[in-house]
């Protein structure tokens, strides 16, 4: 990382610096320092937007957020960042060979987010806060219609006479 940072410092905004910036991110990713890696990949995308490393950095940025995501019982901000980065990559590079894998991971992230919202709805339901529960169930159905969580939310809404 130090050597690559020397290249970046001594030859800023050159093709070599773009490659070095990408490799700093790769080093952090290899060390499972996903937040640091994401920062470095974002720098490639923003500071070297015309370099040959932008597509790799865009892909790896999405993978950093994917790896940093947590199970549905926890904050889903990294999962949402992963979905956003994946959407950006898929839009910028349609037909990329990694598209199928990324779409599967995107679905997984959306399911986690939806499951977290569903868990929140159940939390309110158990506390007999039915208006709050209904709001969360509706969010799951409207924002994540393709998920298993949405099917479960729809069942509750149907039973509550809100379908």
Image (cartoon, helix red, strand yellow):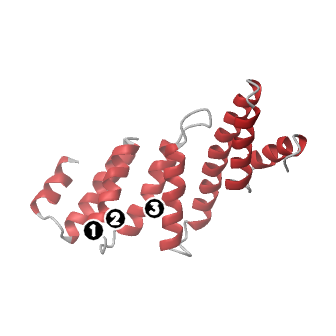
Q: Nearer the viewer, mark 2 or mark 3?
A: 2
Task: Judge the density around disc 3: few (<14), some (14-19), many (≥20) Cα neighbours within 10 Å.
Answer: many
The residue carrying mark 2 is 45
Task: Locate residue 46 relative to residue 140 in the image: left or right.
Answer: left
Mark 1 or mark 3, earlier in chain: 1
What is the x, y in percent for residue 41? 35, 57
| Disc 1 secondary structure class | loop
16 shown above or below 147 = below
The residue carrying mark 1 is 48
Task: Judge the density around disc 2: few (<14), some (14-19), many (≥20) Cα neighbours within 10 Å.
Answer: many
Give me the residue at 55% from left, 70% from top.
97
Q: Residue furthest left?
A: 10
Marks 3 and 1: in contact by CB < 8 Å? Answer: no
Task: Judge the density around disc 1: few (<14), some (14-19), many (≥20) Cα neighbours within 10 Å.
Answer: many
Give me the residue at 17% from left, 51% from top.
3
What is the x, y in percent for residue 116? 64, 39
7 shown above or below 97 = above
Q: Which of the pair 102/132 is nearer the observer?
A: 132
Res. 51 image quadrant: bottom left
Marks 2 and 1: in contact by CB < 8 Å? Answer: yes
130 shown above or below 109 = above
The residue carrying mark 3 is 59
Res. 159 image quadrant: top right
Q: Which of the pair 10/49 is nearer the observer?
A: 49
Task: Locate residue 56 relative to residue 161 in the image: left or right.
Answer: left
Q: CA distance from mark 1 to mark 3?
A: 15 Å
Mark 2 or mark 3, earlier in chain: 2
Give me the residue at 27% from left, 68% from top.
48
Q: CA distance from mark 2 to mark 3?
A: 10 Å
Q: CA distance from mark 1 to mark 2?
A: 6 Å
């Amino acid at each position: 990382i130090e050597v690559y940072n020397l290249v970046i410092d001594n030859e800023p905004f050159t093709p070599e610096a773009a490659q070095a910036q990408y490799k700093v991110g790769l080093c952090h990713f290899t060390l499972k320092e996903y937040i640091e890696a994401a920062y470095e990949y974002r720098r490639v995308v923003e500071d070297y937007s015309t370099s040959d490393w932008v597509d790799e950095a865009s892909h790896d940025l999405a993978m950093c957020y994917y790896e940093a995501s947590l199970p549905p019982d926890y904050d889903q901000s990294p999962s949402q960042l992963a979905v956003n980065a994946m959407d950006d990559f898929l839009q910028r590079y349609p037909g990329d060979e990694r598209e199928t894998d990324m779409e599967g991971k995107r679905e997984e992230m959306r399911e986690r987010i939806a499951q977290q919202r569903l868990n929140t709805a159940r939390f309110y339901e158990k506390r007999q806060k039915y208006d709050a529960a209904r709001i969360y169930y509706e969010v799951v159905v409207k924002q994540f219609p393709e998920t298993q969580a949405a099917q479960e939310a729809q069942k509750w809404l149907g039973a509550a006479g809100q379908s």
